[in-house]
Amino acid sequence: MTAPATVTDDLIARLSRHVAASGTETISSVEVFTGATLATLPASSVRDVADAVHAARVPQARWAELDVRERMGVFERFHKLVLDERETIADLIQAETGKARRYAFEDLIEPAITTSHYLKAAPRLLRAKARKGMMPLAIKATELRQPKGVVGIISPWNFPFALGMSDSIPALMAGNAVVLKPDSQTALSPLYGVDLLYRAGLPEGLITVVLGDGPTVGGALVDNADYVGFTGSTRTGAEVGARAAARLIGCSLELGGKNPMIVLPDANVAVAVDGAVTSAFANTGQLCMHIERIYVHESLHDSFLAKFVEATRALKLGARYDYKCDVGSLISTKQRKAVAEHVDDARAKGATVHLGGVSREDLGPAFYEPTVLTGVTPDMACFAEETFGPVVSIYPFRDEEDAIALANDTTYGLNASVYGRDLDRARRVAHRLRAGTVNVNDGHAAAYSSMDAPMGGMGSSGLGRRHGVEGLLKYTEAQNVAVQRVQVIPPPKAIPYGRYTGIMARSLRLMRKLGLR
């Protein structure tokens, strides 16, 4: 197995030109299926990050002066390019992540969906809006949306193209420049996305990539940008948030999850099993919204478990650059060892491994079999900690209240799922779950793909939202421009202030009575 023919030295050299790097240091990534070197790219220094932010300010100012509809043409062309070049993008994503190709397609298609949504929504959301002044006719207020300036986007390795591009696109649409820091192992696909943006006509200098050690280069980006969007672990996200707060800049943090699924007693078991298999093992379990805890009503538990194990056993695990495998590799041997440690700890403390629980280095250095556990208890690492791999635990519950309490027994709150035939009941349960997105009769995709609705976490799963109104407006500052046509604040000098208070009180009473205020 070698990297696809599309990943050439010429392509890597072209993509390298989008990296802000003034020195001679480099970083290397591997082809995950084999562990062989995939690409060597320039490494950025702390000074390079500061220079990149500074250099972006000039083109950003010009970009912000354009009408939002003038900016949209770039993204119309970008949308088309992503769809036209989907096979090359999928090759890059697979080579640097090792995921199955179907999830490489889901990775690449999300920015197209995001772009399409905001092409329609952005002109409406960003236009000036008239607001009521304190005194009708006398004062006119207008809400404007001003870009933040230079936005720093720090994106993870699990969905490198999707999260690198889908967070950058609305920031650019809102009139900002972007400095993007992807994970060093998965820099090729977001660099290709940057290349597509420039091919689509984005003005030079509006998006730049910095590469290197996360704490060093990522930290420098937080120290220089005007706003930061971060996706990654809860521990690192807390550090990013604290660092941003020290500078009094805003940030959006989409962090970890220990996501639950509830299978109610009236659920269609076959439908619930299909949904659970997909949501537990999608992207080899390396998905912030994927299901790690499944709570099944005790009347269905044994049947569900048997069918779930059978369906999981049917998944095809392998290293292929086509659509013939269901589950790919983990991102690295380090991640494989971390997943194995969780499973080995649970097994040693009495959990039952119904399927999997073994590394598959015969397929590649970072492969691990989809794993199904029962009997997981609070003293086991995988009970409450995020595993972020192809491992799921199944538990019985007694009644609705028990299920809700079990599902909410976590510091995380990113995603949750409820299965049941009675949709009113399932919605009622969903409304009581402490998670930023909750899916009824689906594991994660229904909520995440609904671009007009917000997506993000509660509790330790982060703050801020992507998608929806907030997914665009978070990259802007709200500005209130108020014009006083007739002097009422303060009163004209001809009116004594004591008389003014009576006039004002009567005016406020009248406006309240008429419903004007």
Image: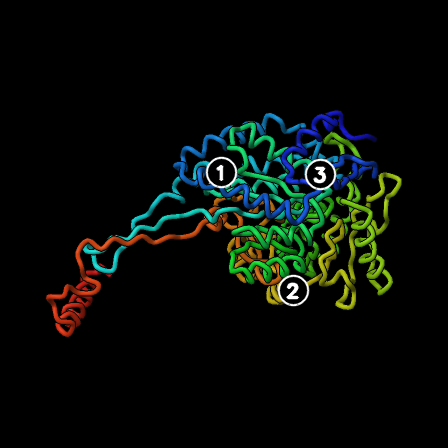
Q: Which residue is mark 3?
A: 42
Relative image position of residue 495 (x, y in whole percent):
11, 68
Of 266 and 138, nearer the camera is 138
Which of the two discs, 1 and 3, labels the residue nearer the N terminus? Answer: 3
Task: Using the image, tell me which numbered label, if any, was put on residue 59.
Answer: 1
Q: Is residue 233 depicted above or below 9 in this figure?
A: below
Density class for disc 2 (Cα within 10 Å; few <14, some 14-19, many ≥20) is some
Q: Which mark is residue 462?
A: none
Whole-number angstrom distance, CA of label 2 to CA of label 3: 41 Å
Disc number placed over residue 410 in the picture, else none: 2
Q: Quadrant of residue 489?
A: bottom left
Q: Amino acid at mark 3?
A: Pro
Is 431 placed above or below 90 here?
below
Q: Please rate how many residues cluster around mark 3, counting C-alpha atoms within 10 Å: few if below 14, some from 14 to 19, many from 20.
A: many
Residue at 71% x, 49% y is 213
Q: Residues within 10 Å of mark 1 (few under 14, many from 20)?
A: some
Quadrant of image for the N terminus: top right
* Residue at position x 74%, y 30% in the image: 322
* Three-letter code for the amino acid on which mark 1 is drawn: Pro
Question: Position of 371 compared to 268: left or right?
Answer: right
For this orientation, the residue located farthest to the bottom is 498
Q: Secondary structure at mark 3?
A: strand
User: Can you see residue 436?
Assistant: yes
For marks 1 and 2 on the same chain, the one whose residue lies earlier in the sequence: 1
Q: Secondary structure at mark 2?
A: loop
Q: Is residue 373 left or right of residue 146?
A: right
